[in-house]
Image: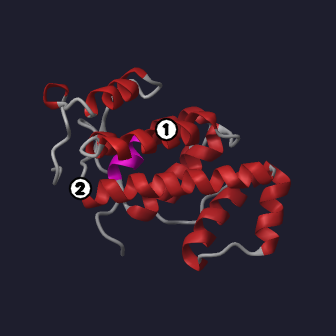
């Protein structure tokens, strides 16, 4: 259960209303999960949702790779809401179920595509080593372009913010979705 109840349309303040409306009528088509929590601080909600819209819908990173980053971040943080919300998008974008299951189970994914292997290695390396070795950077830049690497960092950072919000405020998975991730690190 949420530690902080989501803001509802009936309880919106004057500062919250335009941000709520912008989110609800945008590509997300609703105010859910961490976005509903952020509305307690409408200035944060406005800035974060704008960044999120760019990262999710407008970045140079193909949807398949973006969803790979998002699921990887959700798994890293054990953020069940994020995992449940994005697994269908990842499948729709072309990420294989075998890769998704391996990420969920914290196993080495059976990548068939080199770009997926590189992006996954990037996310894992960034978290484990807090740095990216030159060979990995060069391979990513050759595959996605330097602007693509910038966008990867943005996506990973935004979904870290999302995942941290989910964890701190105990945002449950969407209604009717069975949890898939462990509740604690092994």
Q: Observer-nearest residue: 171 or 42?
A: 42
Left or right: residue 118 versus residue 74 is right
Q: Please report the residue visible at 70 percent of the width from the left and 58 percent of the height from the top.
A: 117
Magenta-highlighted residues = 80-85
11 vs 150, left or right, is left
Q: Nearer the viewer, residue 98 or 21?
A: 21
| Label 1 vs 2, first from the N-terminus | 1
User: What residue is shown at x 55% (from left), y 39% (from top)?
Assistant: 56
Instruction: Give the quarter of the figure containing the C terminus.
Output: bottom left
Between the residue at mark 1 and the residue at mark 2, the CA separation in whole angstroms equals 21 Å
In the rendered image, which residue does mark 2 sit on?
169
- Look at discs 1 and 2 and give the one toward the viewer: 1
Chief SS of the magenta region: helix
Estimate how packed mark 2 is, as few (under 14), some (14 to 19) or many (20 or more) residues with alpha carbons within 10 Å: some
Tell me whether the residue at label 1 lies in contact with that at label 2, contact meaning CB atoms closer than 8 angstroms. Answer: no
**17 part of magenta stretch:** no
Residue, x 74% and y 75% (percent of image)? Answer: 133
Q: In the image, residue 59 lies at what x, y percent? A: 65, 40
- Where does the image place residue 106, in percent across and percent down from the top left? 48, 65
Residue indicated by mark 1 = 50
Image-based side of 166 in relation to 11, left or right: right
């Amino acid at each position: 259960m949420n530690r902080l109840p989501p803001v509802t349309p009936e309880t919106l303040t004057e500062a919250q209303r335009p941000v709520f409306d912008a989110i609800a009528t945008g590509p997300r088509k609703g105010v859910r999960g961490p976005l509903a929590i952020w509305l307690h601080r409408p200035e944060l909600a406005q800035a974060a949702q704008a960044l999120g819209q760019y990262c999710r819908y407008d970045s140079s990173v193909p949807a398949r790779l973006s969803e790979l980053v998002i699921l990887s971040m959700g798994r890293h943080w054990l953020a069940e809401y994020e995992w449940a919300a994005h697994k269908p998008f990842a499948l729709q974008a072309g990420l294989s179920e075998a890769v998704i299951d391996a990420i969920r189970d914290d196993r080495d994914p059976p990548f068939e595509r080199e770009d997926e292997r590189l992006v996954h290695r990037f996310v894992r390396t960034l978290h484990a080593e807090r740095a990216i070795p030159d060979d990995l950077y060069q391979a990513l830049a050759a595959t996605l372009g330097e602007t693509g690497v910038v966008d990867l960092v943005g996506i990973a950072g935004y979904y870290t913010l999302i995942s941290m919000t989910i964890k701190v405020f105990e945002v449950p998975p969407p209604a009717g979705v069975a949890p898939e991730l462990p509740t604690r690190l092994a």
